[in-house]
Image (cartoon, rainbow, N blue to C red):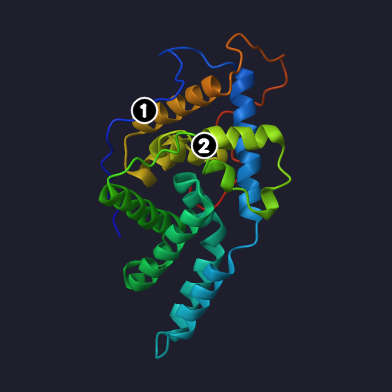
Amino acid sequence: MTASRPAHGSEAQPSERPAGAKIPDAARVHIGAELRAFYACILAEEQPPALLDLVARLTQASTGRDAAAYAAFSADLLTALPGLRAFALSLAINAATADDLVQETLLRAWQNRHRFEPGSNLMAWLCTILRNYFYTECRKRKREVEDADGAMAAQVAAPAAQEASSDLKRVWQHLGKLPPSQREALILVAAQGMTYEAAAELIGCQVGTMKSRVSRARSSLVGSLGMDVHQKTPMGQIASDSLEPAAVQIGLGA
């Protein structure tokens, strides 16, 4: 399946900092650390029974000479499920909506399993299906997909994330106010640890566009969180790779 680049309209920039303004190192590190922590909570959660049952039913329905191959494919779907659901949350924010996206993605992947090339990147293929469906639905409904007041972001925390710090929940809530294109870019790079090049390939955009979206997302978060533009971090407290961490890997890399 070939990824198609979704058409986006103009994006509102909530609390965006002036162009060229330097984000304090401490602010960048803090945002990245909180995003990775919350993302790790999502990956660690038990998957919704409805999604697990769906994969099981699809497997049971497969018979004939290709049954073994289909069973292997369904096992790979189960392995990919936590990362796929986390990616859906980065787009939809709302947990129920994200689960609907994953369900539809699993169904479409199963229907088109003959198109998947064994040995290639299954997670990237699944995420392409998911994001294409997400943006198609957004255009069909002709509605704004931003969560302007952050209300949906407050609903995203599932049981494993309930113990998250107040700072972490606050960052995630403001993340919900970003346009989806910026939100997914920031999650892919800052939370999942993808390179700009790998993230751009997945989304189907230029590397420069990916860098711009991540930068704008970070700037918006710093502004909406009220972080001090003059804040400085003492020497030695910032890891050299803190801006593009690789702490969380879900198989999306090149």
At x 34% / y 73%, what residue is drawn? 111
Label ID, residue 224: none
- Please name the residue that numbered disc 1 is placed on: 12
Q: Residues within 10 Å of mark 2 (few under 14, many from 20)?
A: some
| Residue 129: % across, % down | 36, 57
Residue under numbered circle 2: 150
* Vertical comparison of 4 with 215: above or below: below
Q: Residue at x 73, y 19 (%)?
A: 236
Residue placed most toward the observer, 39 or 10 = 10
Q: Can residue 254 be seen by looking at this rendering?
A: no
Q: Is residue 115 left or right of residue 218?
A: left
Q: Residue furthest bottom?
A: 64
Residue 2 visible, this orientation: yes
Q: Position of residue 97 (x, y in %)?
A: 46, 55
Mark 2: amino acid: Gly
Front residue of 87/13: it is: 13
Is residue 97 positioned above or below 194 on the image?
A: below
Q: Is residue 127 above or below residue 69?
A: above
Give the percent coordinates (x, y) of residue 203: 36, 44
Precedes in sequence: disc 2 or disc 1: 1
- The quadrant of the image that shows the N terminus is bottom left
Q: Secondary structure at mark 2?
A: loop
Indicate the secondary structure of the residue bearing disc 1: loop
